[in-house]
Structure formats: structure tokens, C-alpha cells
Amino acid sequence: MEPSSLFNLAPWIIFFPVIGLLLNIILGGRMGEKAVGWIASLAAGAAFVVSVLLAVALVSEPEGVTVPFAEWIHIGTLQLDWAFRVDTLSVTMMLVVSGVGTLIHIYAIGYMHEDVRFKNDPSRFRRFFVFLNLFIAMMMILVSGASYLMLFVGWEGVGLCSFLLIGFWYEMDTLGRPSWANANAAKKAFIANRVGDFGLILAMFTMFWAFGSLNFEPVFGEARAMAQSQPWVIVAITLLMLLGVAGKSAQIPLYVWLPDAMAGPTPVSALIHAATMVTAGVYLIVRSAPLFSQIYDVQYIVATLGAATALFAATIALGQNDIKKVLAYSTISQLGFMVAAAGMGGYVAAMFHLATHAFFKALLFLSAGSVILGMERGHHHLPHHKGHQEEVFDPGDMRNMGGLRKQMPVTFWVYLIGALALAGIFPFAGFWSKDEILLEAAKTFPAVFWMLIVAAFFTAFYMGRQIWMVFFGEARTPVAHRAEESPKIVTVPLMVLAFLSIVGGALNLPYSHRLEHWLEHTLGVYAVAAQEGSGWVLISWGGLNPRLALVATVASLAAIYLAWRVYGRRPLTTGQPDPLSRLGLVFTGMQHKWFIDEAYKFLFLNPYVRLSRFLAEKVDGAFWHDWFHDTVLTGGFNWFSRTALNQHVDSGFIDGFVVNRILGEGTRRLSARLRGWQNGYVRYYALTVVVGVVLILGYLLFR
Amino acid sequence: MVPVSYYIILSSVLFTLGVAGVLIRRNPLVILMSVELMLNAANLAFVTFARQYNTYSGQLFVFFVMTVAAAEVAIGLALIVAIFRTRRSIDVDQMSSLKG
């Protein structure tokens, strides 16, 4: 087939998931779980195949095309179409989304099979896959749109799916107790994202006001000229966009929703809140590279924000005891790496880390899900089953685990691979991508570089802590002792992801720079970092700086050694406090997320609640409803209708005067007069006729 | 030749006599005769103007008027006979049942 005709397949990346979800909605009820799961997985897989075909087409036409699909909004100068932007950047995202997405779909068949049974609602199995397919479709719209508004449609769509899936078990908390905890987590995610979306909307308004268009091509084409004539326009657009990024990609100050989002089922955490949706913000920055690259100060802000998030979230991850919470903060931290990279102008490095992170973080989350399932199976096998009302067991608490490598060997090995990749150990995928980010940072913003190195150190430490707490030592609870390995349908996707986590670095190895050359077709001059660097950063083995790689690796290895000293040498025993608690207040801060949630509650939530109370009770209730509505409106209306209208106008004037006097009395008198004419004498009638005729004739003659 | 105005004056006088007769007299027969008087006053005016303008339409119209008058008198007399049969009187002042 001609490459250009392959491009016309682009809409199918959305239609396949939509067909899948429609099939499951309409027919899913009559089919078994297997069929539902495989239809959804095949739909995602078909989207992946289309993405691969698009990538194949791009090999011969690498500059990419815009595939028009439907007219959308044509109002005045606003010309927006539903068009698909197929270029190397969007196809990279499509491949990551649909590839990782397909594996997670398959994993979810096994995971949800057990999850719905532990939570006693097997009928919810189908709903999960409908949401999952909807998410894939929305994510595809996000990455394939040729305009900011189309991107925004997907942006909101994935936000909706995130909300639906975080609150999937909306009537319980993460431990299955009846509560609104999960629903509240979903709301929190949605509202935090709303704050960010507000920024993105304003960015789009500003963009339309300044450029007269929301399509990528004209905006990017005029970006440079605009940056010279009106730099503040670009500053406004990019900073407002950054607010959107902070919401979607969980950066300071809006990251607080992501840890709570772990209330969703684990495949959701892996797919949406680690691998794909949260990287949409990074994609937005990379896509908007022509805007972000114009102003140095903006780049500095973005990079610093990303690095600060990376460091801050990494410290919180050190103090968490929930296996998924650690990974959640790790995700925030790694997203901070990507945002920092994109801010520094290292767009390729950001995309590279985005792809490898999608592999190993999806792997880690899914493995964590496998661990949780194993723990739940162990809990299920415990003999005391009558009284599990009084003691609630948390299968995700790492303090309840220990020694799981014996019970769950496959999960252990893939988890180890994911952890090493995340820690950035040679030769795993994370090493290469993190190294590129660090190199960019060393070249552009040294302060950011040191923040990221410290964050990388913490990363390796908390992953080491997790590995030793979960898989090594002795089982700390009878449940962990009875934990069981997961079935093939769960472990096979894990193995595929583990393989990708090992070799993922091959995307952009030094000397070859495949991803860089691939993205160069889309990003153009922005693919290559502006600054060449100087001094000790200058030495390079084909893009890999040996000193820098050494610093990063030494930091990671030191952190792992430290983790072993603290957690590995003397494994935790049941009920033992965390060894890090010797750090005192610092550890308390880490454990309680530096009290940011509480601070937000104090600074924003409580005043907001007070304000809304005031508005509801005082302004709306007392003033508006009681005084204005009841007294002024109702009272005024009553006075007006009863006294003024009824008593005076109606009874007094209309009834008393008009009806009685004029109509009643007047008619009576008139009739009394007129009755005299009707005397029955013919001659009077004749006289009337004569008088009438005379009057008419007189009028005609003398007018 | 007698001037046209003489005829018109005569016609007016006859018509006024007719009107007065209708309004004043109480005998329906006389009233009918007065009506005939008015009709013939009109006929006289028709014929006069027909002569003056030298057309026939006026003269033709007189025939119609005479025909209608004959029919009208027939109906009028029939009414009088009918009224006399019920009331034993033909005084129009006694026929005042329309009095309000």
C-alpha cells in the first residue's frame, strides 16, 4: 500500500476502541467475562496495529500529515476541524498508549476477574472494560488532534475516564469497607484537574486572541515572530498551559490528586495514573515546543517546577507504607523529571523518559497489583473467615508483607527489573532516559541538575526500601505467608513489560539516537537542545557523558546500598517501627506527605467551605432567600397584588367604578332613555328612518 | 317649455306630502297611498331627469318602480287584511306590540 493511503487509517485509532466499548455495552451483558475482556483487549490491540501502520507510513514520509476527518467549528475566523495530526511525535504517543494499553487490558482480564469477586460484584467487570476502552479512545483523541481544542477534547475525556475509574468502587474505600473514600478521591482528582484545565482554557483563549487560530501549524509558524513583537503573549500562554500541565501531570501545586487516585483498581493506576494520561501534560509541553522554547524565563520556570516536584515527591515516597502510594509518589517524581526535561528544551529526553517510564512504571504498578492479589488470596485462605468484620486487613500495606519472593517468584523478578529500571541502573531503560535528562540539565540549569540528582538518589532509595520490605526477609503476617502467585494472564503482560523495561533504552541509545532523529521530523530545530554545554559536561561518548553517568549511577548504587543497610541487613519484624523513624520530625513529615493535604485544607478548602457556607447561609439564605425573596419579592408582590391591585384597582376601580358605575349604572340609564324610542308606533320608526335619511343626505350634500 | 326646476319642486312637494302622510295618518290604507305618493314623486323626478339628459334609463326605471309599487301594495293590503282578521281593527297605533 502507498504510505499516504496508510495515513487515512488514522481515524481508526479512535474507532476501534469505540467499537469495542459499544460491543461491550450492547452485547457484553450476554457474554462471559472472557469475551468481554478479549473484545476490549482486541479493540486496544487493533488501535496498536493501526498505530504501527501509521509509524510504518511515517518511515517513508517522516514529515507527517494532517488527515482531515470532519468539519467541526466554523465561526467567523475560527476554523476548527476534526483533523488527525499524524507525525512522529503523535505516533510515538499512540504507540506508547495503545501498546502499554493493550498489555494492561489483557492483565486486567485476570486482575478484574479476582477483584470483582473479592468485592462481591462480578457484574461490574464489563463496566470496567467499557471505561478502559473509552479511555483509550479519549487518549487517542488527545494525542492525535491537530488543534489545541481537539487536544482539549481528549484532555477532558481522559479526565472523565480517570474520574470514572478512580471512583470505580465508589461505595467503598480501598479496603472494601462501606465509605465514600473512593468517590471522594475521584472528586478530588476531577477538581484538581479542573483547576488545571482552567489554565489550559485561558491559554487557548489567549492563543486565539493573539494568533487567531488554535491549529498547531499556524500558531507554531507565527510563534517566533510573536515572541519578538509581544513576548508577554507567549509568556501568558505558556504559563497558563503550565497550570494545565500541573493539573494533568500532577506537578506542584496540583499533584495532590494523584496519590489519592490510587483508590482506582490497579490496572487503572498503571494505565491512567502512571503510563499514559498523566504524561499528557508532558506531551502538551513537547507538542508546544515552538512556544515554550521562545522565552528563556518560561523554560527556567518549567524546569525548576519539574525538578522541585521530582525532589519533593521523592521525599514523600520515602515515608509511605502503602505499596501503591510509594509508586504514586514515584510517578509524580518521574513526571517531574519529564516536565523538567521538557522545560529545559530537552524535548527528546522528555519523550524518551515518557516512553521508558510508561514501560517500567506500568510494570511496577501491575506487579504491585499482582502482589496485592497474592496477598488477598492469602487472606482468603486463612482459616478464620467468619469474623473478618472486626479486623480489616490491608493487602497493600508493605508492613504486612515480607518474604514474598518465595511465594511469588515471577512477580518478584519482574518487580525487581522494574525497580532497577526506575532507579536508573545500567543497562535498564531508565538508566538511558534519566541520563539524558540529567545531561540536558547539566548543560542548561545546573541547579536543576543537582535537584534531579538528589531526586534520583531518593528514587533508588525508596525502591530499594520497597523491594526489601515486600520481597525479602520473613513473612510478617500469616497472610503474607500464604500469598500465592498470580495466574498466567496476569504474569505474561508483566513479562512483556519487563522485557520492554530492559531493552527500552534501545529507543535512543548513544551514537544511534533513533528517537531523536525520529522526533526531529516533527520538532525540527527544537529536537536538538539549544545549549551545547561547557566544561566537564562537554565530554561525550556519542551523547552519553561518562562522568555524569558515573555520578548518577554512583548516587543510585549508594542509595540502594543505604536501603540495604537500613532495610535489608536486618529485615523488619512484625510490628517493628520503620527504621527511618529515627530521623524524627523529618520522617513524620515524609510519612504525612509534608502535611500538604492538611495545609491545602487549611489554606484553601476550609476558607472555601466557610465562604460557601457564608454564601449559602448568609448571602443566599438570609439575604437572598429570606429577605430579598420572601420579604421584598413575595411581600412586595403580595402587597401589590392584594392591596394595590385587588383592593384598589380591581375592587375599587374596575369593579366599583368601571363595572358598577359605567357599565352597570350607565347602561341602565342609557337603556331607560332609549326605551322611550321603542314605543311600538310605526310612524315613529318611519320618522327615525326619515331623520336618518335626511341626516345622511345632509352629510353627503353639505360635507 | 316648463323649466326642470318646476318639476323638481313639484316632485319634492309630492314627496314631502307622502312623508307627512306616512308619519301622521293612522289609517294604513292612507299610509299605503302616501307611500305610493312618494314613489310617484320619485318617478316624476326620474322622468324629469330622463328628459333633461335625453336618456331612457330614467324612464325605464319608472316602470320598475311601478311594478315594485304594485307588488308592494299587494303585500301591504294582504297584511292589512291579515291584521284586521286578528285584531278587528286597522289602526296602526294599536299595532304597538314591538314596544320595548
Image (tube, rainbow, N blue to C red):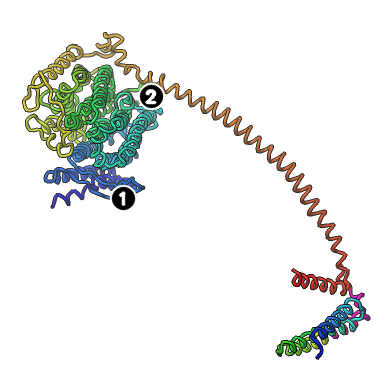
Q: Which stretch appears magenta?
A: B77-95
* Residue B48 pos. (x, y %): 77, 87
Q: Indicate left or right for B70 with A139 as reference.
A: right
- Mark 1 Cα within 10 Å, few/some/many (few <14, many 20+)? few
Image marks 2 and 1: residues in contact by CB distance under 8 Å: no
Decide if residue A128 is in sight here.
Answer: no
Main SS of the magenta segment?
Answer: helix
Q: Nearer the viewer, residue A421 or A431?
A: A431
Q: Secondary structure at mark 2?
A: loop
Q: Position of residue A47 (x, y in %)?
A: 22, 44
- The chain containing the residue under callout 1 comes to A
Is residue B24 visible in the rendered image? The answer is yes
For residue B83: magenta?
yes
Q: What is the chain identity of the residue bearing mark 2?
A: A
Position in image of residue A49 (x %, y %): 18, 44
To which residue does mark 1 refer? A71
To which quarter of the image does residue A604 belong? top left
Position of residue A13 relative to residue A578, above or below, is: below
Mark with earlier residue (2, 1): 1
Q: Which residue is mark 2?
A: A389
Identify which residue, A60 or A75, lies in the foreground.
A75
Residue type of the residue flagged with mark 1: Glu
Residue A687 sits in quarter? bottom right
Is residue A94 positioned above or below B72 on the image? above
State left or right for residue A560 relative to residue A218: left
Q: Secondary structure at mark 1?
A: strand
